[in-house]
Amino acid sequence: MAQSDLMVRAVPAMIADAPDRGCRMLEAVRALAPLIAAQRDEFDSGRRLPEAVFAALADAGLFRLWLPEALGGPELSPIEFMRIVEAASAFDGSVGWLVGNGGGMSRIGGYLGDAVARDWFADRHAFVASSTGAVGTATPVDGGYCINGRWPFGSGAHHATRFMVLASVRPEDPNSPLLCCYLGRADVIILDNWHVSGLRGTGSCDFEARDVFVPAAHAHPFLGLQPTQPGLLYRMPPSSVFAWSICGVPLGIASGAIASFAELACRKGRLGTRAMLRDHETVQATVGRTRAMLHAARAFLIDAMAELMAATDTGGQRLVEARADIRIANAHAAETAMSVTDMLAASAGAAAIFETCALERAVRDVRAAAKHIAMSPNNYIIAGRLALGLDPGAARF
């Protein structure tokens, strides 16, 4: 069986109750498997997705997953969204990362004015690169702000049509509210510094802006923003949903790793024996255990998101606890995915260190993804502090 077929089998099969739109998007991901496989080597050498792959993702609507229905988007539920991101990541971590980032940032259509959102997303290939890893300055001027700064981890920067940055009117004041400001592609300087071990194809370069004017209509508060669309998705806590947009990536990479290992185990033997890897009980147990780990981590994520959705309009302590739980579910999923890929690579032996082995890419990609702040082990501290009656100890909670 071809590896692309195995990858399809690795995609979660939990969509029986999903609306047709989610099923259609999942089929769109599956249809891209041959193109991704054919051009995967260019992901690493170019340190970005090839134009043909990016265009195919955009044409499939995978960068518009959270665009409001009123603006012509699918407005997927968070659970549907995670399944799509996980499916894309099972084929390739860099692809899943950009689907999560690009599809997630289409949610800004629920906060911008109608005319602005329609203008930006009229382009089928619209992609918003975002960075929250640094804070620039937003000096008030007539009609808007003058933006200056440098921001890291601009995933998809080479393909982006817009760049979302965090900026402060009073950067010297740690309590000054942060603004999300949207810059045009021509307004930024991309710094080609994405030389990394994992997720090389994401092109997550630094970028900077120098005295760029941003109209007031192209900015909104980072926290406490008021939605312009009525859907639950846009009423949910922004920081929680922002983190959720990429939580399916590590699970998808691990899911793809299980499929890749299964293929390898059917054709690779142990030195000194005639038996295939798959014939060893220790290998069989490892595959069974990793499947259990993956399903458990996914179930925790879905349970935590379901509670966050239910608690959004309830508010109060219930919402505080739900926000803490979604954080630890993200961290737990990433840790589990790393353990799964490590266990499989260990069972594969020396074959897993070669770049021609899909497990080699899975190991480095999942570790790169887990470094994101959304999946940081510090999330356990926040949840623990709240459970012990303390404040969260995090400015952006």
Image (cartoon, helix red, strand yellow):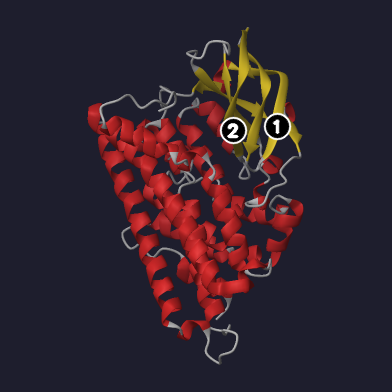
Q: Which residue is mark 2?
A: 131
Left or right side of 75 for 151: right
Instruction: Decide: few, some or many residues near mark 1? Use Cα within 10 Å; few <14, some 14-19, many ≥20.
Output: many
CA–CA distance in space, label 1 to label 2: 9 Å
Residue 312 rendering spot, x and y as whole percentages:
29, 33
Location of residue 385 (image quadrant): top left
Please report the residue visible at 44 percent of the width from the left and 23 percent of the height from the top.
Answer: 395
Q: Amino acid at mark 1?
A: Phe
Residue denoted by label 1: 207
Q: Residue at x 46, y 59 (%)?
A: 339
For badge 2, the amino acid type reads Ser
Percent x, y of residue 180: 54, 24
Secondary structure at badge 1 equals strand
Q: Residue at point 51% right, 19% down? A: 178
The residue sitting at 55% across, 48% down in the picture is: 369
Q: Are dots 1 and 2 in contact, CB under 8 Å? A: yes
